[in-house]
Amino acid sequence: MKAIPAPGIRFLRSFSRDSWYRGLILVLTFLCYTTFHLSRKPISIVKSELHYNCSSRGGNPNNESNSTTWCDWKPFDQDNYKELFGALDNAFLVAYAIGMYISGIFGERLPLRYYLSGGMLLSGLFTCLFGLGYYWNIHQLWYFVLVQIFNGLVQTTGWPSVVTCVGNWFGKGKRGFIMGIWNSHTSVGNILGSLIAGAWVSSTWGLSFIVPGIIIATMGVICFLFLIEYPEDVDCSPPLHHVSNPDEKGLEAGHSISDGSLNVSTHSRENIIDVAETGKEPPEDREAISFIAALRIPGVVEFSLCLLFAKLVSYTFLYWLPLYIVNVAHLSSKEAGDMSTLFDVGGIVGGILAGLISDYTGGRATTCCTMLVLAAPMLFLYNSIGQNGFATSIVMLIICGGLVNGPYALITTAVSADLGTHESLQGNAKALSTVTAIIDGTGSVGAALGPLLAGVISRSSWDNVFYMLISADVLACLLLSRVVFKEMRGWCGSYTRKRGSNTSF
């Protein structure tokens, strides 16, 4: 007679299997979105090469009278080159913002594996087409703008897909910390994109796009072969998204409950529930919700509008920081690209800290607001003293990167996943992609406005660009004030209940 394993042994076996698959999904989605950002970054590195101070390269070999623009890539050799660069940025970002709202709807209704991998293959194609403009000797602005528009549209398949997939596999317990680490793919992609683009920017800038295009297309094939959308598809346990007992509302903030001798935090309680789970939960309702229904989820509108201004700041740095460093610090294109990666290093640290702090306190909005308040004076200081020395530049870039990208990372990951599995949905998990698309789509409107405004404002003064960024941070903070007030009121109520319980007989 075959022995039946004890319940504890059965649980450990299930835990090992679940952990292995969850680790696989984290790594796979991390690499997927790393390549998305890796393919977006080259344009910011190549800008300074498309319009270059040619006098630093010696005399004009063609003996033409205009000796300062002979090495520029037409049509970016004109005085309005900043506006043309802004047009390239906005061709991508406006298409991305518009496409994101549509992408979330498709993402809920199509298999994520096909949707994500198809988008990556097309993104690789359009990224390569931009670089091929160098080899085909294309100097028409419409070609580069058109490629950017199509690339912006197909890249909208990425973010809703990866957040939905991670949200399907991970519950709320330590979601902020896990997704804070996971979200470093944004900064890792930016860093790798800068380094790869910088390797060819001064010699053959076409390869600065072609190589990242090949990388994201290759990753799309890997995604198609290995991505698993739901835990149930491989007989794994689905995650616990929220505490279902209505008497435990308010515990999501991470506060303690007391019943005399027992004092258990929300995160510990979730772990206990997971440990006690010996069977499979019934499959959740997978009927996709409507766009309007997603907007009605508490907090979606506030966080969406906050992200609009937070992403405006982040993407202005993404597209304009290398050029700012070239103009202000007078470094070469490659040196400026390498220096700009420090902003993304800070972004990695900031994203992890934001997730860790928000998990501990339960205050997603309060964490974002605090970092936004601190970011405003840091941006002013970076513009004022950031170029006073090499060490000062390093420190200021890391600090600014952490404070700017921390809230952005938290909202687009843990907050989106929380709202996409909100208890008001009554177990319907088919809201993650739509909610993520609404939040990130609204944020992408700001991402489109930021580089556009920077291109126009920088003609008068870089100081004015930083004043714009500081104002955007303040507005982002104000838009979260109502949610912050609710979190603080919840903390006060929880403290009062806990104190009353401890003093009762």
Image: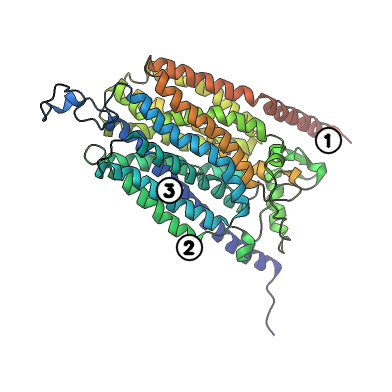
Q: Residue 255: x percent and y percent?
A: 72, 37
Say whether residue 98 is left or right of residue 45: right
How many residues crowd around disc 3 within 10 Å: few (fewer than 14), some, or many (20 or more)? many
The N terminus is located in which quarter? bottom right
The secondary element bearing badge 1 is classed as: helix
Which mark lies nearer to you, 3 or 1? 3
Q: Between marks 3 and 1, how big is the CA–CA gap? A: 57 Å
Considering every residue shown, the one lying at the far right of the view is 505
| N-terminal-most mark, 3 or 1 | 3
**Three-letter amino acid code at disc 3?**
Ser
Q: Which residue is mark 2?
A: 225
Is 233 in front, or is 440?
440
Which mark lies nearer to you, 1 or 2? 2
Q: Residue 486: x percent and y percent?
A: 72, 28
Q: Between marks 1 and 2, how big is the CA–CA gap? A: 54 Å
| N-terminal-most mark, 1 or 2 | 2
The secondary element bearing badge 3 is classed as: helix
Which mark lies nearer to you, 3 or 2? 3
Quarter occupied by residue 232: bottom right
Q: Which residue is mark 3?
A: 123
Is 472 in front, or is 340?
472
Instruction: Identify the mark at residue 501; answer none if there is no mark.
Output: 1
